[in-house]
Amino acid sequence: MNTPALLPQLEAEITALRQQLAAFRFDLSGKDWLTVEEAAHYCGVSRSQFDSKIAEYGIEPRNFMGKKLYEKAGLHRAIHDASPWARTATSGLAPAPSSPGPSEALARLARYERKRAPTMGRRK
């Protein structure tokens, strides 16, 4: 087995799995006001993307008890009012693979952690 060639692929898969698992941290049901991290998650973008682009959409946060809060309805309105996605011609390309479900993502991460555990304390 060619281990060095597999490392970038494994790292990319682990990154994708961690992003999927991070989505489980946020339970936004019933909330009208969201923290910055929750608002970025609600909008489907990273925190840095959210911070750099939010002003373009005219959304003003509120300062409440030292927290920057965003109104969920305002975020929804900004997403709805944004310009539609422009499709590009993708003739000849294979369809993108679908993402694994949460249980599959957890199983993959557990398999990786088990494989990695014996080598965690060793130095090269």
Image: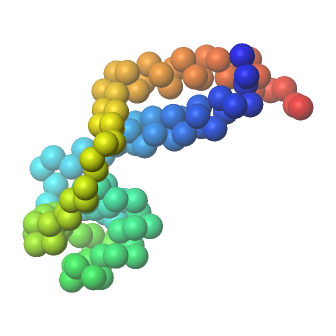
Residue 38 to residue 53: above or below: above
Q: Residue furthest front?
A: 92
Residue 57 to residue 49: above or below: below
Position of the N terminus, as image quadrant, is top right
| Residue 62 position in % (x across, y down) | 25, 78
Q: Residue at x 58, y 34 (%)?
A: 9
For the residue pair 7 and 112, the one nearer the viewer reads as 7
Can the viewer see residue 24 in this picture? no
For the residue pair 86 and 11, the one nearer the viewer reads as 86
| Residue 70 position in % (x across, y down) | 23, 70
For the residue pair 2 and 53, the one nearer the viewer reads as 2
| Residue 55 position in % (x across, y down) | 30, 82
For the residue pair 91 and 37, the one nearer the viewer reads as 91
| Residue 104 position in % (x across, y down) | 37, 21
Q: Residue at x 19, y 63 (%)?
A: 85
Number of marks: 0
Residue 63 to residue 107: above or below: below
Q: Residue at x 73, y 24 (%)?
A: 3
